[in-house]
């Protein structure tokens, strides 16, 4: 439902829409995935008429990767802001999200060292090679 509402808004605003996806904790990971989904679904709908890609489309990967505009206006999210969100993926996917899918997007993760979920999972994420897409900012939990 959200995607259809965004498309209506983009059409009404002639593509001049700034979209910020945001969330806390697991919602932060969801916000990043929603931003990536929005960017890739817009690209795929424009390039393939809404159809799933076929093997022949794989030859056009470079052209699709460079085509991140629709009618001259950006079609990706302007911002992703997360609060205390988990690391979502390995370095390869994090780099792909930052440098390709969401390359025109500001991705900011606000975290602090007193968050028990982040503190308790840090070692697990490190051992699994999980990284963040975008920039992580350590905040002072006692001095906003």
Image: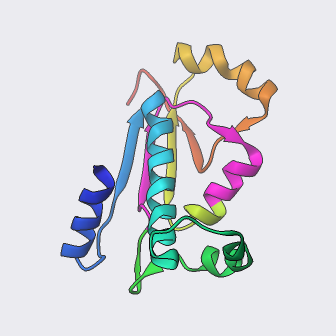
* Residue occupying image coordinates x 55% and y 61%: 102
Q: Nearer the viewer, residue 136 or 99?
A: 99
* Residue occupying image coordinates x 44% and y 48%: 34
Q: Answer with left or right where residue 14 lies relative to residue 129.
A: left
In the image, residue 3 above or below residue 60? above
Res 131 → quadrant: top right
Residue 129 location (% of width, % of height): 79, 34
Report if residue 37 lies within the magenta region.
no
Q: Nearer the viewer, residue 134 or 93?
A: 93
Name of the residue lying farthest toward the bottom: 72
Residue 105 location (% of width, % of height): 49, 62
Residue 99 location (% of width, % of height): 65, 63
What colour scheme does the image use?
rainbow
In the image, residue 14 above or below residue 92? below
In the image, residue 94 above or below residue 131? below
**Number of disc labels:** 0
Q: Nearer the viewer, residue 10 or 51?
A: 51
Q: Answer with left or right where residue 34 lies relative to residue 59.
A: left
Res 3 → quadrant: bottom left
* Residue occupying image coordinates x 38% and y 49%: 21
Residue 106 location (% of width, % of height): 49, 58
Quadrant assignment for the C terminus? top left
Range shown magenta: 76-98
């Amino acid at each position: 439902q959200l995607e259809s509402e965004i498309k209506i808004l983009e059409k009404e605003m002639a593509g001049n829409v700034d979209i910020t996806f945001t969330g806390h904790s697991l919602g932060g990971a969801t916000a990043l995935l929603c931003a990536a989904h929005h960017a890739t679904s817009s690209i795929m709908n424009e390039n393939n008429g809404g159809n799933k890609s076929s093997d022949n489309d794989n030859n056009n990967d470079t052209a699709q990767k460079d085509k991140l505009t629709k009618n001259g206006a950006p079609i990706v999210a302007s911002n992703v802001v997360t609060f205390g969100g988990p690391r979502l993926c390995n370095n390869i996917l994090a780099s792909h999200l930052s440098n390709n899918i969401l390359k025109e997007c500001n991705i900011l993760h606000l975290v602090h060292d007193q968050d028990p979920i982040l503190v308790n999972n840090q070692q697990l994420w490190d051992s699994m090679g999980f990284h963040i897409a975008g920039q992580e900012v350590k905040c002072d939990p006692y001095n906003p």
